[in-house]
Image (tube, rainbow, N blue to C red):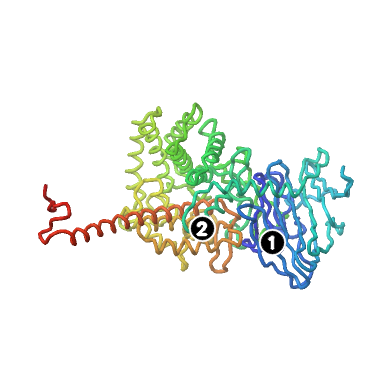
């Protein structure tokens, strides 16, 4: 069985990523892109479905330290055994467009015997490649595996031997010695890739990540987690297209053993929009523009063809199918590739995009002959579908509904259109948008707010709540302190908050999503609750919940989609962009409200001190130091 989700670390080369377990096994790796077929799929099956293990051979060996080097995705693991200690450094080179994973084993003290086992299985663990040893231009031998369009080349020191359709062996490193290996993917029709200087590749990769992270603006006590979260967002972003995948994995279960297993290796417009906001907030204007350009290219064309998600390059066809040969993580089946939600109508998406682009304008971004006309076309799309029901933010696979969150984001879309004209001088039918905005607002209060329960509701005319209602003040529909929101928060706390204070998305027992009930608290929703608390004077509760949530991050700072509080385990695809995005927003809210509180306290203290000085220096009849009576002239 694969390791616990929280035991994995991510490597990234800005095109794809590898998941390395704490036991030294690479159990998931797709080449050359995040959404390509995997070469290692043990994460969703067994070792026979592909993995690359590198770990001490003797009993009792233990990991004493595991961390990213500085502010990077270069992973360093310290092993201690009965005979010595060793350091394993692993990374994916950045900068030369090389699709590879490098593993470097260095003896630190004594001697440590390492075992290695590599099973190369393209095609999600289904394809048995043709494997042979080849001589490189350098004269050194390497192991080459070929299957159709894919070629994998393992080169370096201490190459393993073939044993029963896999390769294995052992070697010993002593203090001061080093064993290097590199696994390279390349198109099978091309010649063998050339050797590279691994010292230089490691240095260049470290330099890239550290230079990128150096631009991150501080965010109070949670700065390290914000920085790591922004790095995760960058790691999940294709450096060429700007598309950000929701996660580098597919089918890690939201409910262990259950069917809620989805492929998240695609680019949701919602995630891209929220990433743009986070990058703007923390000083990454160039990256924000790159994400904007991906958004605009992805949605270009007939607005009626708008999708909620696309491939990394903007591909539209993402058909969903099941991989019956894989048993799934911990037996959770089915394992899915593609995502059937691609054809859903989710009415909130345009609003999410336009809110992000409005924030880009406020930050000084300018519109051009392509960007603003496309936004106007998107507003026309919203107008044409203003009466349509949708699947909602959670991609419900049941009956279509009027979801209140979706309707609020439609209001936000028209609000952004109005602001673009009134505040930024762009051209558009502002009077019509203002009328539609007003109609949407009245409709939402009439059908999406239950006055008897004093709460916004998940769907029009319903009584149940939904964590997505916490987004309502984030887009300015009402204030965080509005009585309607305070009533909604009270209802959410009663209906969806568990014993640890974590927030469920909604009650799956309602059957509204068309699936069997059962899932765990969705981390992004709980971060939204932190934000709400921070803006409404509930700072102690906000900090306590934030500390709980960041405490769920693993030793290298990564978060999954959900958290099983009963088992104390991460659940869902990993690492999850949406969780890290929400973490950044929550930290921003705490940092911002703390700054406002300190400023207010400073002003109050100044006034109090002034009053005290006035009382000491003035007279009994209330004349102050300037000789002017209160209220006098």
Residue 514, given in percent of the width and then of the height, sits at 53, 54
192 or 207: nearer the viewer: 207
Q: Is residue 568 left or right of residue 164?
A: left
Q: Which residue does the numbered mark 2 point to in the structure image? A: 522
Quarter of the image where the N terminus is located: bottom right
Q: Secondary structure at mark 1?
A: strand
Q: Based on the displayed image, in which of its 4 quarters is residue 224 positioned?
A: bottom right
101 or 610: nearer the viewer: 610
Residue 194, given in percent of the width and then of the height, sits at 81, 42
Residue 592, given in percent of the width and then of the height, sits at 41, 52
Q: Which residue is pictured at 71% across the width and 57% down the height?
A: 89
- Label 1, label 2: how many angstroms apart (C-alpha)? 30 Å
Q: Which residue does the numbered mark 1 point to in the structure image? A: 77
Q: Secondary structure at mark 2?
A: loop
494 or 50: nearer the viewer: 50
> Outermost residue toward the left?
621
Observer able to see residue 293:
yes
Q: Considering only vertical position in the picture, is 563 above or below 344?
A: below
Q: Which residue is pictured at 60% across the width and 44% down the height?
A: 237
Camera-nearest label, 1 or 2: 1
Residue 620, given in percent of the width and then of the height, sits at 11, 62
Q: Considering only vertical position in the picture, is 483 above or below 15?
A: below
Q: Residues within 10 Å of mark 1 (few under 14, many from 20)?
A: some
Q: Is residue 500 left or right of residue 238?
A: left
Observer able to see residue 132:
no
């Amino acid at each position: 069985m694969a390791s616990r989700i929280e035991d994995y670390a991510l490597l990234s080369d800005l095109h794809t990523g590898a998941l390395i377990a704490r036991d030294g096994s690479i159990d998931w790796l797709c080449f050359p892109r995040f959404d390509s077929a995997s070469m290692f799929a043990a994460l969703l099956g067994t070792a026979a479905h592909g993995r690359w293990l590198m770990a001490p051979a003797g009993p009792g060996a233990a990991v004493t330290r595991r961390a990213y080097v500085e502010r990077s995705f270069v992973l360093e693991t310290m092993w201690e055994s009965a005979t010595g200690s060793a350091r394993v450094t692993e990374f994916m080179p950045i900068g030369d467009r090389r699709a590879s994973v490098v593993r470097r084993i260095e003896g630190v003290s004594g001697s440590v015997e390492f075992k290695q086992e590599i099973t190369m299985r393209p095609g999600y663990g289904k394809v048995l490649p043709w494997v042979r040893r080849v001589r490189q231009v350098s004269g050194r031998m390497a192991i080459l595996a070929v299957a159709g369009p894919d070629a994998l080349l393992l080169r370096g020191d201490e190459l393993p031997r073939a044993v029963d359709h896999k390769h294995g062996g052992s070697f010993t490193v002593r203090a001061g010695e080093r064993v290097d290996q590199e696994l390279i993917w390349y198109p099978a029709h091309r010649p063998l890739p050339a050797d590279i200087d691994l010292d230089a590749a490691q240095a260049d990769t470290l330099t890239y990540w550290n230079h990128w992270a150096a631009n991150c603006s501080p965010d109070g006590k949670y700065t390290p987690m914000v920085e790591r979260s922004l790095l995760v967002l960058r790691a999940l972003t294709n450096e060429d297209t700007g598309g950000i995948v929701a996660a580098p994995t597919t089918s890690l279960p939201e409910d262990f053993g259950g069917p809620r297993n989805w492929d998240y290796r695609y680019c949701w417009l919602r995630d891209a929009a929220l990433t743009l906001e986070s990058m703007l907030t923390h000083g990454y204007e160039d990256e924000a523009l790159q994400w904007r350009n991906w958004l605009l290219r992805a949605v270009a064309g007939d607005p009626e063809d708008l999708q909620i998600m696309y491939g990394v390059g903007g591909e539209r066809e993402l058909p969903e199918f099941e991989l019956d040969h894989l048993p799934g993580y911990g037996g959770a089946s089915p394992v899915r590739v593609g995502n059937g939600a691609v054809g859903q109508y989710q009415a909130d998406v345009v609003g999410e995009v336009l809110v992000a682009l409005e924030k880009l304008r406020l930050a000084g971004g300018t519109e051009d002959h392509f960007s603003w006309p496309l936004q106007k076309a998107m507003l026309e799309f919203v107008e044409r579908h203003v009466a349509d029901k949708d699947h909602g933010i959670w991609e419900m696979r049941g009956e279509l509904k009027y979801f209140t969150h979706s309707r609020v984001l439609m209001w936000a879309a028209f609000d952004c259109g109005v602001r673009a004209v009134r505040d930024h001088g762009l051209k558009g039918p502002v009077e019509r948008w203002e009328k539609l905005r007003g109609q949407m607002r009245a409709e939402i209060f009439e059908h999406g707010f239950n006055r008897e329960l004093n709460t916004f509701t998940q769907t029009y005319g319903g009584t149940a709540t939904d964590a997505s209602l916490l987004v309502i003040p984030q887009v300015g529909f009402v204030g965080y302190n509005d009585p309607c929101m305070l009533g909604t928060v009270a209802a959410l706390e009663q209906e969806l908050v568990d014993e640890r204070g974590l927030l469920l998305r909604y009650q799956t027992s309602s059957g509204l999503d068309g699936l069997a009930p059962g899932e765990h608290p969705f981390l992004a929703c709980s971060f939204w609750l932190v934000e709400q608390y921070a803006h409404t004077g509930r700072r102690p509760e906000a900090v306590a919940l934030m500390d709980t949530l960041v405490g769920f991050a693993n030793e290298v700072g990564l978060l999954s989609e959900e958290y099983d509080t009963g088992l104390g385990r991460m659940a869902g695809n990993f690492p999850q962009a949406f969780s890290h995005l929400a973490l950044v927003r929550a930290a921003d809210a705490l940092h911002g409200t703390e700054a406002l509180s300190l400023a207010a306290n400073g002003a109050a203290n100044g006034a109090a001190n002034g009053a005290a000085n006035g009382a000491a220096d003035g007279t009994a009849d209330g004349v102050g130091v300037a000789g002017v009576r209160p209220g006098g002239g």
